[in-house]
Amino acid sequence: MSEYQVIARKYRPQTFRDVVGQQHVVRTLRNAINSGRTAHAYLFVGPRGIGKTTLARIFAKALNCERPVDGNPCCECESCRAIAAERSLAVFEVDAASHNSTADMRDLADSALTSPVGGKYKIYIIDEVHMLSKAAWNVLLKTVEEPPAHVKFIFATTEVHQVLPTIISRCQRFDLLPIPTRSIIERLRLIADTEKVAIDDDAISAVARAAEGGMRDAQSLLDQMIAFFSGGDGSAVTGEQVLSLFGLTGKKELDAILEAMLGNRPGEVVCRIGTLAARGKNLETLFDDILSALRAVQLCTIIADPAELIDEGAEAIANYRRLSALAPADAIQILLETIAPVGRVLHDALNKQVYLETVLLKAMREAHAVRLSDILARLNQLRAAGELQFLDKLPVIEQRIVPAVIPAAPAVEEKTVPEVEIAPAVEAKPVPVMEKKTVIEEKTAEEEVIPVVEEVVVPAPAVEEKTAEEEVIPVVEENVSPVEEVNPVAETNAPEIEEELPESGGAVFISDSPFPPVEKDDGNKESTIGGSGRRSVANDEPMALKKAIENPVVAEVVDLFSGTVIDVHR
């Protein structure tokens, strides 16, 4: 009995025609061979199991092939058979993970100077090249930059960011992509039929999903499934068996969860997640499946033909179209936006089941919440159906701004005040501030103050605003005898009058009177207090107030510092 060879090695591609999913790299390499424009160094970058080393071997065979066919190796000449059997003296495969010292690279650089044996080129395939140290790269740097004409370098790595930029700049770089799931399914079906293995489509689809874009991983998993479930009774490997082995969720269970989420049935979502967790399903994989399925459902709502972006078959795309009709497009968008950012947190969560349930319920609450646009759309529907016609018949309500009501003071007839005898002392009461109000200024009998009727005039903007207690309003008086007694406090602060009172040094200020001219009994308007003849004196000298009272021109005494009127007379 011959030794068994694993599927990944047995079905490794031998020509560019057999390579799956890397057509952009295959086309470039074939054209370079056909035109004879091959570079001296190549760099293949990509995740594991997608064909970096396989492409390097095929390219090496094509370079040394004696009879290449359209850029492909013939696989029949001695050079092709030697490379396939790994006994060629012209092709060297180096594992940089174990040969990464400066001595190893110095030996390689020295051997590159000799001529090839058994081929046109001496080709060095260095795998996992990112494992080389900086010193080792420095030894090989000059050889990579300017190698002999018979030397070709092919580097392969999964961590290109660890490769020195000076090396990358000297190579032709090719980025290999993850292989689409549909291509993996087709290749696995071909292998299963060739090996005469009974396995259903659900099982192959589950294996392809678990491979996550790597053909080598998919072939290894298929080999494992065949060894695990084939008991010699001829029964086929089913999808349930594969799902149970890898902890994956079936399509039907995943569709049921999506239907409950799109239909806003939180109880059903929680129950199904609890059932899957009890059966030992991988909840992180379930989260990834839900996220991928929601993306596919969203693409079906915004793209007419999403087959190019969804890595699924026609049946799966039809199923996603059916799910997209269960909820509005904006609800699907909110579900996706809420779920997408929490994948890393789920990986670190202590209780993954509770966290996954919480995330899905929160996303459903936000996605199915009533929004203002929904309310407006419903009102427009009702209005179009004639159910809101009564709104047009309602009277229009005018909104008026009602000003604040201030209690008005009792109306007092404005008239000229005749001579009045000195009134007895009356207790002062607070006066409400109004545009027009009656203020009765009361003083004690000793000060002999006569109550008068005053009209408050709004001061000009230049005048400083004062409180009701500080503001003293000038009055219009007629036939009022001058006050004989003077407030001692005012007497000490009153200034003397300049010009009119030559004996004092007080400054006299002329101000426009807000009062109309009032004639005295003799009819002489020049002796009136109102009009442009009104004068004010600043109390910058102690004797100013006393002398201002005796002056017939001065009408008021002003505080020099605050600008307030401290006395009004005449």
Image (cartoon, grey):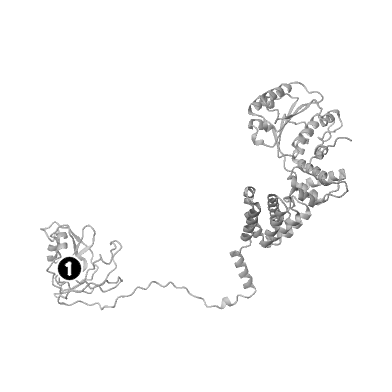
Q: Nearer the viewer, residue 458 or 344?
A: 344
On the rendered structure, is 165 left or right of 4? Answer: left
Tell me the quadrant of the picture where the N terminus can be found: top right
Residue 144 x %, y %: 69, 27
Q: Nearer the viewer, residue 297 or 527?
A: 297
- Residue 488, compared with residue 453, is above or below; it is above
Residue 38 located left or right of residue 165: right
Would you name the residue on which mark 1 appears?
A: 569
Percent from the top left, x then y, of residue 130?
67, 33
Return the x and y of residue 310 as percentages of the image width and height. Answer: 73, 51
Which residue is found at the position 71% from the left and 22% from the top?
Answer: 107
Looking at this rendering, what residue extends furthest in the front direction? 278
Q: Helix, strand or loop at disc 1? A: loop
Report x, y in % for residue 340. Answer: 64, 52
Q: In the depicted view, which residue is nearer to us: 486 or 453?
A: 486
Q: Is residue 336 above or below residue 22?
A: below
Residue 452 location, quadrant: bottom left
Image quadrant where residue 477 sits = bottom left
> Please, what is the three-letter code of the amino acid marked with disc 1?
His
Tally of numbered discs? 1
